Image (spheres, grey):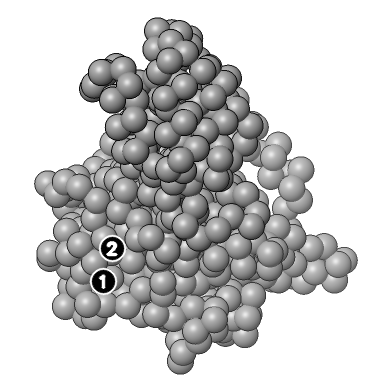
Amino acid sequence: MPSPGGERQRVTRFAPSPTGELHLGNARTALFNLLLARGGGGRFLLRIEDTDSERSLEAHAAALMADLRWLGIDWDAGPDREDERGPYRQSQRGALYTQYLALLEGQGAVYPCFCTPLELELSRRAQLTAGRPPRYAGTCRDLSPEERARRAAQGLPATLRFRVPRGERVVFEDFVHGAQTFLTDDIGDFVVRRADGSAAFFFSNAVDDALMGVTQALRGEDHLANTPRQLLILRALALAAPAYGHVALIVGADGAPLSKRHAAVSVREYRERGYQPIALLNHLFRLGHSTALHGLLQLSEMARAFDTAHLGRAPSRFDEPQLRVWQKEAVHRLPAEAARGWLAPLLPAGLDERARDAFIAALLPNVVLPEDARPWVDIVFGGPPPLEPAAEEAVRGAGAGYFSAAAAAAAESGNDLPAIAGAVRAATGRSGASLYMPLRAALTGRAHGPELAPLLKAMPAGKARERLARFA
């Protein structure tokens, strides 16, 4: 796959803010960046953008990293794997930001802005009322040094704004959307340092990409308008810019941004519902990225197949039924030990190994999520199940003699389906569905379900005889 970043070693990154849970859109961004790096033998970085001290929480950062690891998305360098390009938490990079902000101040490329939030909001409303796009009006751009000193002496809080040059075009090639052009007169001066002294996103994100050697920054389409601002910062600092690509957002089936009304939206929710990470990865891999490959893919296969030329420009529709298709395939492929761990929380305490393994063998081909197995836990290990209408009809049609033979065989042979069926066949002459359907109905209360023989092996001793004898 051609590298959109040139011949340098490919370096990508995922740079979340720890202000909440890892949602599906961010998980897909992390996956695509991992695949972009791995497909070219490059490096994938994790950077925690926690300069917003009021909203960034360590608990969110820890949970985010745990979710990434659960998905199988691992990084070459990050907050727990520092190298010479770190630290990988922006809250620990303040000295670097101060250094580069000073360079901008020395060039006159930034200036203090004393506008209050209220003044900025009134200005924004006035521009919208006049039919103009809202941008900073430049109120503090040309204050004299004396006026700035006077306001600072009064203790007025000030942000630091980047002085956007006028009358220019910012042109770049987005490796998803193609050529992009922005007029600087449409941008407006923007904040690079907040009033509390912390670096703002436009600044810290761009500087860190350059200092960490990022060659490709693949991120959500909502960041596309940020790119010209960041290119202006990097140009002023004479720092190398990554190639930027912006992937279309994920929406629900109705075309609206993905939200709780469409499905679960956080990785944690899917994890807790019992989804397999490889199922979620396969679904995300195909959201906004086309591939000719079918079937469940491993991460290494996704990396070989990932191509930025196959990233779509239209929003991607999240389809939970399709996710369930991948989940079903993933569950069917589960090794025995993984299957035991997946269903273990549902099983009765103290269940012996033989019964546990027989139950899992019976259920695994028939379930998509652990919750699908819950009714069968009650059927196999609980009291006599009530009969569904179809099952009741099958039991009534079989007659008492049928179940007398079945119960006697179960008492003699235990929960052995071939022995029970053989005795009933000999006593009644039945075969095929007419032989086995009443057994299933009496034993499980249902006319359909998992394979009956392993279900019987999982049942406690004597339970099959008791259930059959009810109808003798």
The 10 Å Cα crowd at callout 1, few under 14, some 14 to 19, many 20 or more, is many
Question: Which residue is at 24% across, 66% downward?
Answer: 300
Give the amino acid type for the residue marked by disc 2 in the picture: Leu
Q: Sequence-wise, which precedes: disc 2 or disc 1?
A: 1
- Please provide percent x and percent y for residue 404: 47, 22
The amino acid type of the residue labelled 1 equals Arg
The picture quadrant where one finds residue 142 is bottom right
User: Where 110 sits versus 119, above or below?
Assistant: below
**Is any atom of residue 471 visible in this view?**
yes
Q: Which mark is residue 286?
A: none
Q: Nearer the viewer, residue 79 or 395?
A: 395
The structure residue drawn at horizontal position 32% and vertical position 78%, both measured from the top left corner, is 43
In the image, is 206 to the left or to the right of 181? right
Residue 379 position (above or below residue 56): above
**C-alpha span from label 2 to label 1:** 9 Å
Please tell me whether mark 1 sits on a helix, a strand or a loop. helix
Q: Residue furthest right?
A: 154
Q: Residue at x 63, y 81 (%)?
A: 92
Q: Is residue 258 above or below residue 26?
A: above
The residue to which callout 1 is attached is 38
Query: Could you say which quadrant of the image residue 305 lies in?
Result: bottom left
Residue 299 — which label?
A: 2
Tell me whether circle 2 and circle 1 mark residues in contact (CB < 8 Å).
yes
